[in-house]
Amino acid sequence: MHIASHKALLGALIGALMSTTAVAATPTYHVAVLPTFGGTRNQGNSVNDANVVAGVSTKPNSPTRHATAWYGDQIVDLGTLGGVNSSVAWPVKNNHDRIVGISQTTTPEPNGELWSCAPFFAFPSNPTSSGYTCLGFAYSDGAMHALPTLGGNNGYAAGANNRGEIVGWAETPLRDLTCEGALGPSHQVLQFLPVVWRPGEGRGAARTLPLLQGDSSGSAVAINDAGQVVGISGACDQAVGRYTAAHVVLWENGTVTDIGKGTLTTPFWNTAVAINQRGDVVGFAGDPSDPSGNITHAFIWTRAGGLQFLNNAPDDNSTATGINDAGQVSGYFADASGALRGFMWDGSFHDLNDLRAPGDTTFIALADDINNNGVITGRSATIAGVRYAITLTPATP
């Protein structure tokens, strides 16, 4: 079935399913395993209020990854921009049949940069994960369209709102002296800036967002319907975080604010991931003992309460990935053995594996997004050699 034919159904579902009421009690969840194309790597990274899941999947006997959407039990390959890999890697939050993400092209990368897309394609061993430029895409009406850069070679689309605005980051033609450069493993050379692509401006315009004073590169990752945008500001570095994520920032009304100022003192891996319609922000902060970013701490920021960490355990290693309008947060953490486990936070920190409905046995390794119906998407632990995209639906009382 053509994706465009789902539009009427999506509109009806949005009206029927959307809910922003406060959560009265911690729910239990029914876990559903989503269909695959027969490959071993599948993951849901975004779920909108029509319960449409988007993420990534692989084909049989192939390490390459394609951006994927799940409409209930129907799985749809969103394709690429000519290259062999693509992905929907962040919560998108658009309810009108628009999905955004990243895709390789067929253009060789002239500077040898790995850019921001390669890490999402590099595991398991994938010889096709680098060597070509990557661009942000917008997918609607059954077609994938490339989004422009700022004159450089690469771009990235991460989030979208219901007004048709898309946010991400894009390279300029300028060489940034704070980039890691050819001496480092990412080979990053060019400056990149946070951008907004707006409807009505065609596909030829990427508007930049301001950085904090003294910073040279940055990224925008999420936008709500009020036009509030969150992201990072820092040095060019690797184009995948680290010292680019020196500061967690909020853009609104033409200004940029460091929302971690005074709380986050480590100058790396401080990253916003999602924002809800109230302007609450979640993400993760770097640990001062670990510049590699293997240890991070999930946080929430609200205008009233400032920034607070979600898990105060002394061995916390967690990442917050999504937030809905009721303030429920999804994410994942590493347990004492190093195994990943999905969590939900509603004022208290819950291992989602402890909230499965009776009879549900699928192990929840990642919880990557949560919508206003309380539905969570992510992925399972490996089951007979396969990692499945999953949804968690609150059980009816």
Image: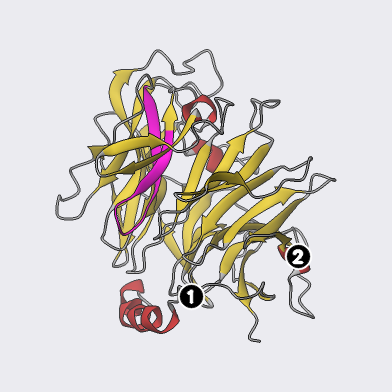
Q: Could you tell me if the residues under marks 1 and 2 are in contact, i.e. CB atoms within 8 Å?
A: no
- The kind of secondary structure the magenta stretch mainly shows is strand
Locate residue 357, reporting x and y percent. Answer: 74, 78
Q: Secondary structure at mark 2?
A: helix
Residue annotated with mark 1: 21
Provide the residue span drawn in magenta.
216-232
- Determine whether 392 is above or below 310 in the image: below
Identity of the residue drawn at 35% across and 47% down: 229
Residue 60's place in the image compared with 375, above or below, is above
In the figure, is residue 337 to the left or right of 276?
right
In the image, residue 238 lies at what x, y percent?
50, 26
Q: Mark 1 packing: few (<14 Cα in 10 Å), some, or many (20+)? A: few
- Locate residue 382, reporting x and y percent: 74, 58
Image location (x, y in percent) of residue 55:
51, 58
Tell me the element at label 1.
loop
| Of callouts 1 and 2, the N-terminal one | 1
Q: Specify the farthest residue to the right.
A: 337
Q: Is residue 182 above or below residue 275?
A: above
Seen at 65% across and 44% down, the residue is 124
Q: Is residue 290 visible?
A: yes
Tag count in the figure?
Answer: 2
